[in-house]
Structure formats: C-alpha cells, structure tokens
Amino acid sequence: MRRAFDILPPYPPKKHHRYATPEKKAKKQGRQIFWFLFIVVFVIILIFGFGQLQRLGQNNPATSTSSSNNSQSSSSQFELFNEGGQSNLLQSQAIGTAKILDGSGQEKSAAIAKDILEKARFHIEKVEKSANNYEKTIVYYKKGGEKLAQTAAENLKPTFEVETQESDNLDKGIDILVIVGAK
C-alpha cells in the first residue's frame, strides 16, 4: 500500500522567488518616494498656513493687547466671518460703508447689487426692503462722498440704470445709500 506523500510531493512547487524582483523593488521605491514627497509638501503647507494665520492675528486690532489693560486677556483667535456672515478680511479693506434698500419689487435685485458692491470692496451694513418702488437705481451720498458714489454707480451701471444724488439724511456710519430700482 502506498502512502499519499509518496504519490504527491509534500509541498507545492515554488512559484515565487523568495527575494523581490527588480521590478517590484522599483515599484516599492516609487511608492516610498511618493509618500515621502506628499508628507513633505503637507508639512510645508501646514507651516505656511499657520504663519499666515499668526500674521493675520497680529494685524487684527481685536486680538492685539493694549499696554494699559495687561490684566485683561484678549482672544487670540482670528474670526474669518462676522455675525452677518461677511468676511472680516474684506471689511478691513473696505473703501466705504453702504446700505441697500430694495425698491425694485423683484426678487434678488438687492442681492445682486450687494454682490456687485462687495466685489467693489464696499462694506454692506444692511439690506432691507424699501417702502416704495423705484424705476431707477439711486445712489445717495453724504457731502464730500461723491467719489464713493461714482465708484458704486460705475460698478452698478452694467446691471442697473443708476443716478447719484447728495443727501443729508443718511444714517450715521453709512457712506452711501443704494436704492435698487426696477431697471
């Protein structure tokens, strides 16, 4: 009687070499180089990003400490957006403050005007519905603020028909009042 291991070899024949082939070595080395470079770039981005945040935090007057109030600690966090959802970065670079009234009777006209003026670096204080409807868009400005009104009007002209007028009745802290008309 024959035994099973006499007929079949006890181990299957070897199909793979014990040592890696040159192709496998090159492939493994390529993966190692990729991950090394990925980690190096990631660390550089982190260092650069934290440096930028620190610079922004130092320039922000809300986070700087005054020498007279050493006992009072201030927040060292930089807030990217204020309560109204507007960027604090754009607000610090604003050329003027505007209030927008929607007098068009159409949806989204005030939102379009707001976007245009924000891109022109105006800080938008409020957007409200006007009590009356207007045909044309009117930009009211304070005495001496004609340049700001002209800048706003030039930016709004491709979309709206715009006039500028001087007014003494603007709210405190508002440089221009934009009443968005139907045209």
Image (cartoon, rainbow, N blue to C red):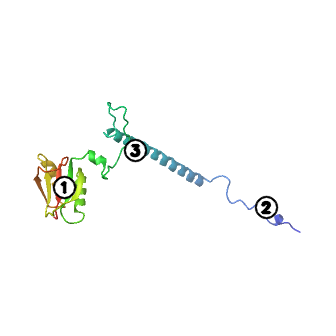
Residue pointed to by mark 2: 10
Residue 161, position in %: x, y? 14, 61
Q: Residue 171 versus residue 165: which sits nearer the camera?
A: 171
Residue 13 found in image quarter: bottom right
Whichever of labels 2 and 1 marks the residue nearer the N terminus, that label is: 2
Whichever of labels 3 and 2 marks the residue nearer the N terminus, that label is: 2
Q: Amino acid at mark 2?
A: Pro
**Residue at 32% from the left image edge and 40% from the top image edge:** 62
Residue 140 horizontal side relative to residue 119, left or right = left
Looking at the rendering, in which quadrant would you find the N terminus? bottom right
User: Which mark lies nearer to you, 3 or 2?
Assistant: 3
C-alpha distance separating marks 3 and 2: 62 Å
Residue pointed to by mark 1: 155
C-alpha distance separating marks 3 and 1: 33 Å
Whichever of labels 3 and 1 marks the residue nearer the N terminus, that label is: 3
Residue 180 horizontal side relative to residue 81, left or right = left
Residue 64, position in %: x, y? 33, 37
Give SS at disc 1.
helix
**Residue at 27% from the left image edge and 44% from the top image edge:** 92
Give SS at disc 2.
loop
Q: Which mark is residue 49?
A: 3
User: Is 120 located above or below residue 76 in the figure?
Assistant: below
**Residue at 82% from the left image edge and 64% from the top image edge:** 5
Residue 147, position in %: x, y? 14, 48
Q: Which mark is residue 96?
A: none
C-alpha distance separating marks 2 and 1: 86 Å
Crowding near pointer 2: few (<14 within 10 Å), some, many (20+)? few
Crowding near pointer 3: few (<14 within 10 Å), some, many (20+)? few
Give SS at disc 3.
helix
